Image (cartoon, helix red, strand yellow):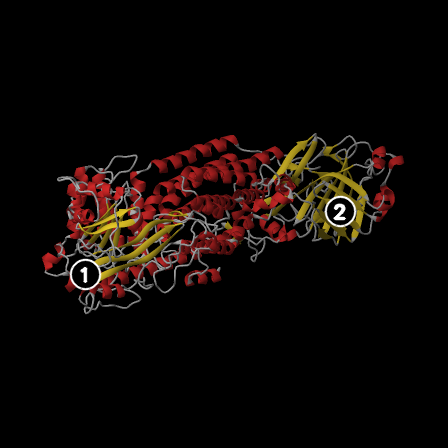
Amino acid sequence: MHLVWVFGLGLVASATAQATCDNFGTVKSDGSCECPPGFGGATCSEPACGGNLFNGPQRTLSQNSSTGGMSFAGCGCQDGWGGAGCNVCRSPSICQTAFSAAGGPSSGSGLSPISPSQVGNQTLTCATQSRVYAAQQMSCAVINPTLQALFPLSANLNILRTLDPTLSPSPNVTSFGTAGSAFAQVFYDGVEQFYCQAGGCKQTVGNDTTDWACESLKCRCRPGTAFCGAQKNTDLSTVLNSLSGSLTVSCTTSSASCAFKQSLLQALFGSGGLGLSNCVFGECVRQSVVDSALGIAPEVTTAGGESLSGGVIAGLAVIGVIVLAVAILVAWGCLLQRRARATRNEKQTASGRRVGVEWKNVYYVVYPSGSGSLLPFGGLRRRNAVPVGSTSVVELHDLEGSGGEKPLPSLPSSANHVKSKTLLSGLSGSVRPGQMLAILGPSGAGKTTLIGILAGRSGAMGGRVSGDVGFTIDGGEGRVKVGFVDQTDVLPPNLTVIEALLFAAKLKLPESTPPAEKLARVEHVIRQLGLSEVAHSRIGGNTERGLSGGERRRVSIALEIVAGVEVLVLDEPTSGLDSVSAANVARVLAELAHDPENPVAVIASIHQPSSRLYHQFDQILLLSRGEQVYFGPGGTAPVRSLESRGARGMEEGYNVADWLLEVASEGVQPPSRGGYDTSVGTRASVYDPKAQPNFYDQEHGITSEKKLDGSMRYRGGGGKVSVEEDGDRSTKEESNMVRVVRGRGGQKYAATFLTQVQVLCGREWKNLKRDKTLFYMHLGVACILGIFTGGLYFKVGVTISGFQNRVGSLFFMGSLLAFSSLSALYNLVEIRPLFTRERAGGYYSPAAWLVSRVLFDVLPLRIAPTLVMTCITYWMVGLSPEAARFFKALLVLVLYALAMTLFVSSFHASFSERGNLWKYGSGTVDWFGQFPFWELAFSYDPALPPIDIANFLLATSFRNGGVAILLSALFNLFTMTYAGFFVNLSAIPPVLRWLQYFSILKYLLEALAVNEVGSGLMIQDTLEGVPVNVSASLIMELLFGFGENNYYRCILVPRTWAPSKKKFLCCLSVRLGGSSEVPAAAKENLTAA
């Protein structure tokens, strides 16, 4: 039996001696009594009946009971209020509602600060912990066996604890007395028995406990009540009136219990004093007061009255910094763009220059994949190689291992024991400006491999390349413009022909070229290639009809020559075309090569040319199993040469090209002297000056010897080398074959970064405008799923199961966003070939491409649907109505959608530039100079969560989009498992628990749950008949293992991992590149990281 807790009764004499106030009420100047909360009447002896705390003196009072006292036993409490006397608030929003109904403002924005210096959220909330912030009401049941033997009916103890009345929203209404005071009343069967007052109180707060220690205590009995004289044998008046001295009230929130400790009571009931059970705590207080007590950053009230939390202020500051940085970058870009357009580069605009190509002793040896290396790159290393399908190229690359500055690194010893395969064996040759060279040979002869080497787009994998490749430049200086046309036409399907050519012209022509001149150049190329009739037709793709095969091939050529190429390399330009289309392509190539003003050196591999097509070419290079069977003039010259070496005779009228392929397939004795054909008089490495002049020579009266006389210049290391004329020609030319070394200086792209972004955005806008399917689908799915999710969790309650559903709705939203982001991966699989071609062609930088994708893919297809779905679901579910909470939740979801998309976008597209990192395929070849690995490794968004590392490996390891999507789905399943919804994170065995830190969904769910609980959410439920009223933060930690202060950690922790991610990418880059050397720029970025 719990002895009824006794707080003594004190009669306070009035200063005027005209009135006596019960319950330690105070006498006002007019002689009336000012009563404690919950009491009224002339002498403060009548308890309130129903209503709420903010009604104050206007509350309805109780009537006389049959026991001789004022009783509220028959009074009912309003919704949201509880405890004996209905003074304890029970829900977060009830305080603001009651305050507004009593005449106060309807929201916290209308509440005046307690003092001019106070800042923060002025909204009233109900604090339901045992801790006191300003003035708290508590009500407990007195259950003591000893007392219940004497008084079997229900007994309750109400205590008003006032810590600081100035912090209470309505002093003397929601609080009473001075700071550090307590007022208590004991009710038996609804009738007050005695009341007490204590002063000099101090509060000590623990993790789940609160101790309220007071220095002075006095109590007064109400005569004639059950405890105080109704029955003489149960009269406790003497004991109760004698209660004095120190007092301690110790409470535990989780168990809803307290202990009333006073010396007399401890002597009667033990050291624990009088036990109190089923306690409820409630305090109407400003949210800013609670935040200040808990050490949360104070909130700031703006002049307009809208409150901003510290997190929102920090977010606004970050956004401001980002906006300022973007503005500065845009201004700087505009300045650079203006300077570039105002400065005419004479070297770039020089016309009339003639460029040829020479190669000597080119070998290519392949070793089995993985021999001597953990990665299938073997010993291949291309230090100074450069993608030459670009206007940004100075000259063709040299192949290391041919007597240059550094020898080709030897393969590991383990590779020496593996049988190698030689695909190209000592090939030599040259092409002068104005000549067309056809590379012929049966399938597997090495045509595409040689084309790739000459164009700087070697398809080598695990092999070694050696030899020399260089340019011969006659007149003028500056970068050599080399174009490369692959055998597959990769074109933007939604653009018209003229739009595609303008796109290329704007990016590949110098920035200083006027727009009118670029347009004129495009129109000239369209007329030159016979595309006038389809200039305004869409190119089309696999799913929509557009241009024919021949027209598409001519558009591919036009994209390369629109910038004015000097060397054009083509890989099987006539494959898959009918005879008429192939003839048109050959005619276009001949016109380009034989242009009187700007002759172009054309190199093309031809699979099976017709007789008409064959005779279009000036030079022929015939390959057989990687060996050079013939190199020299075209026409019937190859027939005479091969017949002289034992080949079977060619029938009259037979197609020369077919005969050459047949002879190459049968095998023939290779020419002697390293490729010099004695029967034709043509040397493979350089031209014989006695050879018959070609079209270009005849038109200008220039012989080969004149061109070699002092004007042949090799660009290398910044110097120029002239060919001497005395002595033996072949010996001198061979000894003066200078390796061409690519210079490091100069501008990387013809257009400035800002121009690249503008042009790319223009194309993305056209794509989005002309193909709205994906945009409408994303928005439609977002609306449908938002309504479905909102209906599934419509207006969840505040019970334990309701809270679980509340978190379930947040988990469901995160899962939907995770799986909807898979469309970004498939989208990139589709556009990857186009990105690869344009990036290798020097159109733009990966950073410019990524900016345009963010603006026209991420924003409309990822962010907009996320906003739509969140706005629908959030309010239908009934989550926290506070504006700040809503925008914080929106921020987390948007960041999550960005992360799930950008991990696919930034790395998948950037590192798939070669098709596959693990396979050295067609793409760029400059490992540390041009390939954007370093560029992207140090320019990606450091705020991305750790999921981007896994997807980087995923996107670069698998070329098949289906496999990538499958593994992305499995990774989503992993993040869902470790999100904390299916399993309590703290309950996972330690050996597997650490994996939770790689689950981005875990950070999303925890941040959203903490944001929701932070609004003061209380759980009100009944378990097996026992009422439960606890903070939702306790349930959140018990069910899911989330910490209530982890919101900003869940946003900021991934950002701290950026340096480690950068180092990881650097190390992987070096390993993939087969070199331990790190470029200077990369070292600087690594040091900064």
Q: How many marks?
A: 2
> Where does the image place residue 579, in percent across and percent down from the top left?
18, 38
Residue under the image location 42 percent in, 37 percent down: 962
Q: Is residue 708 left or right of residue 850?
A: left
**Disc 1 marks which residue?**
353
Residue 27 spot, x, y in % from top left: 71, 49
In depth, the one of 61 and 238 nearer the eye is 238
**Structural crowding at the residue carrying mark 1, measured as other residues with C-alpha within 10 Å and reported as few (<14), some (14–19) or many (≥20):** some
- Residue 12 image position (x, y, % from top left): 77, 49
| Three-letter amino acid code of the residue under disc 2 | Ser
Which quadrant of the figure contains the N terminus?
A: top right
Q: Considering the numbered disc 1 on the image, is that residue within a helix, a strand or a loop?
A: loop
Task: For residue 636, say whether it is visible.
Answer: yes
Give the residue displayed 63% in from the left and 44% down from the top: 991
The amino acid pointed to by label 1 is: Arg
- Quarter holding residue 22: top right
The x and y percentages for residue 553 are 23, 43
Is residue 685 left or right of 115 when viewed as pictured?
A: left
Left or right of 264 on screen, residue 434: left
Above or below, 453 relative to 1036: below
In the image, taking residue 551 as reference, residue 966 lies left or right, namely right
Q: Identify the residue position indicated by label 2 in the image.
A: 250
In depth, the one of 796 and 778 nearer the eye is 778
Compared to 657, does 780 lie above or below?
Answer: above
Question: Can residue 823 be seen in the rendering of this structure?
Answer: no
Which is more foreground, mark 1 or mark 2?
A: 1
